[in-house]
Amino acid sequence: MTHQVLTHCPICSNTLTITKLHCQHCHTTIENDFKFSRISQLSEDQLHFVEVFLVSRGNIKEVEKELGVSYPTVRGKLNDIISTLGYKKEEKKNHTAISKENIVTMLENEEITPDEAIKLLKR
């Protein structure tokens, strides 16, 4: 029986390291300090989003349709994943205007926080 790899300590939440690898076939065991890939830091929901994004070949309209979410939600999820992977968010002006009605809908659907809604309304 195999289990999902834990990346963080269940006691203190610090990042775990892999110290032992074992081959079930020939019983070779390798011990050392190994690190996780950046991708392994993603949650199951984030990994599902990445899978949908890749299968959609990055087409945000397809991702919206597949996940049943709005464009701003897709962008927010992408930004969250980028941040989780350790990349800094680029500070670019968003030239795509979001209507007040969309902001209210996103807030009602809990796709954004009240603070995020206020920031969007101030643009």
Image: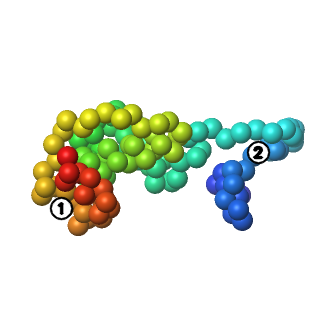
What colouring does the structure picture have? Answer: rainbow
Decide if residue 18 is on the left or right side of residue 46. Answer: right
- State the separation of the CA atoms marked 2 and 1: 45 Å
| Residue 94 left/right relative to 8 | left
Q: Residue at x 29, y 63 (%)?
A: 114
Q: Amino acid at mark 2?
A: Ile
The answer to whether 10 is drawn above or below residue 56 in the figure is below
Q: Residue 97: x percent and y percent? A: 16, 43
Location of residue 92 with respect to 66 vertically, above or below: above
Residue at screen point 58% across, 46% down: 41
Label 1: which residue? 104
Q: Nearer the viewer, residue 113 or 77?
A: 113
- Residue identifier under label 2: 18
Q: Identify which amino acid the numbered label 1 is placed on.
A: Val
Name the spot of residue 5 as percent of width and height, x first.
67, 52
The answer to whether 34 is drawn above or below residue 99 in the figure is above
Q: Would you identify the image quadrant in which residue 34 lies?
A: top right
Q: Secondary structure at mark 1?
A: helix
Question: Which residue: 39% across, 34% down?
Answer: 90
Indicate which disc, 2 or 1, sits on the residue closer to the N terminus. Answer: 2
For the residue pair 55 and 18, the one nearer the viewer reads as 18
